[in-house]
Image (spheres, helix red, strand yellow):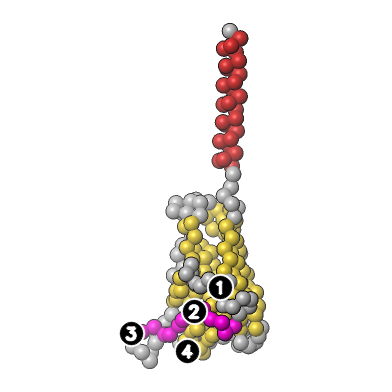
Amino acid sequence: MQQNRRYLITLGILLVIIITFGLYLSMKKPEAIIITENFEEGMEMWIPDSDVPMDPNRPGQHVNWTISLTQERVYEGSYAAQFILDGRQDDGTIWLEQEISLEPNTKYEAEIKFQFWSASESFNQLAYVVGQASPVDLEEEGDFADLGAANLVEGWREYTHTSTFITDDDGLAYVGYGVSVVWETEIVYFIDQVEITITPS
């Protein structure tokens, strides 16, 4: 009788421990993801992409654009990403993008922060800086948030953007940053010291 009682007490304690641990695991939030990029090891993790118009001077072809590593202008270290776009059609957005695996059906807050270089300060808005974190693949200009004019200062300036989103069943998210032209001119800008923090909320 006493042995059975001890057995039941032990079993009860084990059940309490198991239930408590199960509740802890179910309530535990995924950890924050921090992505830093200074381009010292290349751009392999980033996919260059664009939403640019056709070039009237080259039928059947889009206007020229490139995103590449450079040592011409750097905020820190030896390399930065150079963004070049033929904006003479007063249109076009180019960016670097990365796919990230997160927890499915989970709400996140994302902060994108990076250094952006402009050759001059201008009262005319030649272009604007863009960035976004989203559960939907970034495919066109309208998918991005406007982070401000690209020519606010001569030299380096920090830009930031914060957003919230909920992942789909696949748990994928997409982060991107770049520049969008709004003046009929060719543009050249640089981005360095990128930091992206994605936190479950």
Q: Earlier in the sequence, mark 1 or mark 3?
A: 1
Q: What residue type is labelled 1?
A: Glu
Residue at mark 3: 60
Instruction: Point out which mark residue 191 bears.
Output: none
**Residue tagged by mark 2?**
68
Q: Mark 1 points at which residue?
A: 40
Q: Position of residue 83 (x, y in %)?
A: 52, 81
Q: Give the range drawn in magenta.
A: 60-73
> How dense is the environment of label 1, judged by Cα within 10 Å: few (below 14), some, or many (20 and up)?
some
Of badges 1 and 3, nearer the viewer stands 1
* Amino acid type at mark 2: Ser
- Where is residue 109 drawn, in percent x and y? 59, 58
Q: Which marked residue is nearer to the observer: mark 4 or mark 1? A: 1
Residue 85: % across, % down: 48, 84
First in residue order: circle 3 vs circle 4? 3
**Label 2 or label 1, whichever comes before in sequence order:** 1
- Answer with left or right where residue 14 lies relative to residue 169: right
Q: Distance between the residues labelled 3 and 4?
A: 17 Å
Label 4, label 1: how many angstroms apart (C-alpha)?
32 Å
Identified at 42% across, 85% down, the residue is 63
